[in-house]
Image (cartoon, rainbow, N blue to C red):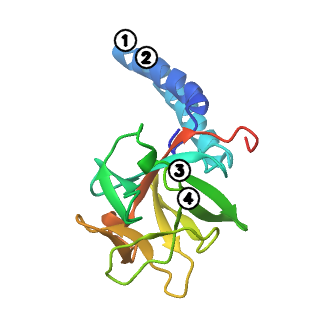
Amino acid sequence: MKVGYYKSELLNEIREKAAAAQTVYDNKNVEKYVEVYKALYDAIVKLENNKNAMNVIIPGSTYVITNAEASNKSLSINSVTKMVLCATSNVKSTMQHWVLERAGEEDLFYIKNVRSNTYLGALPDGETMTASETTGNVAYKVIPMGDGLMALQCQNEDLKSLNYTGTKVIGWSHDGVMGSQWYITAVELNQTEI
């Protein structure tokens, strides 16, 4: 399950309407064009207006956080030095598994690494980030950026977002910066929160 994408089961009606429209088109059944395309349009509008149609973060669940610019790199941690980094994506690696714990508001989370049991802390200005063992040290706001992309904005005084530069993870603006945008994909859902 990718956060920020439509729930798969809700896309079935659109798939059916699109298949019907394709059949009408392939058969050159001109008198049915308006009818099938209106039905497809109505199904799309219905989905877009459904406030519960998107996959959202389920607190206490485990996720892999993959960088948008370096799409084969996921947020990881060096379990010895506690340095936060991006490594080649491996959904099975617990060094790349992060639990998002609710931090008050709906879109605020503490982000804890499964392997090291440490949290993302404040984002140092241009310096490599390290994780903290302090529970709830710094919350991160998950900001939808469109197309399934999310920015992770540190809620300290700087309000910088998690950014992968190609060599290290630092704090930076998320506006228009692909290195500061992430895909969040569930690995294990917290069943008590569903």
Mark 3 and mark 4 residues within 8 Å of each other at the beta carbon: yes
Q: Disc 3 marks which residue?
A: 114
* Chain-order first, disc 4 or disc 1: 1
How far apart in space, not on screen, are marks 4 and 2 (Cα)?
51 Å
Q: From the viewer's perspective, is 53 left or right of 92?
A: right
How far apart in space, not on screen, are marks 1 and 2 (Cα)?
5 Å
* Chain-order first, disc 3 or disc 2: 2
**Position in image of residue 6 (x %, y %):** 55, 41
How far apart in space, not on screen, are marks 3 and 4 (Cα)?
6 Å
| Residue at image point 67% right, 42% down | 190
Q: From the viewer's perspective, is 21 left or right of 41?
A: left
Mark 3 and mark 1 residues within 8 Å of each other at the beta carbon: no
- Between disc 4 and disc 2, the foreground one is 4
- Between disc 3 and disc 1, the foreground one is 3
Q: Disc 4 marks which residue?
A: 112
Please rate how many residues cluster around mark 1, counting C-alpha atoms within 10 Å: few if below 14, some from 14 to 19, many from 20: few
Q: Disc 1 marks which residue?
A: 27
- Between disc 4 and disc 1, the foreground one is 4
Q: Is residue 133 above or below residue 66?
A: below
Please rate how many residues cluster around mark 3, counting C-alpha atoms within 10 Å: few if below 14, some from 14 to 19, many from 20: some
Outermost residue, bottom direction?
Answer: 157
Q: Is residue 74 above or below residue 122?
A: above
Mark 4 residue type: Lys
* Chain-order first, disc 3 or disc 1: 1
In the foreground, 156 or 14: 156
Mark 4 and mark 1 residues within 8 Å of each other at the beta carbon: no
Q: Secondary structure at mark 3?
A: loop
* Quadrant occupied by the C terminus: top right
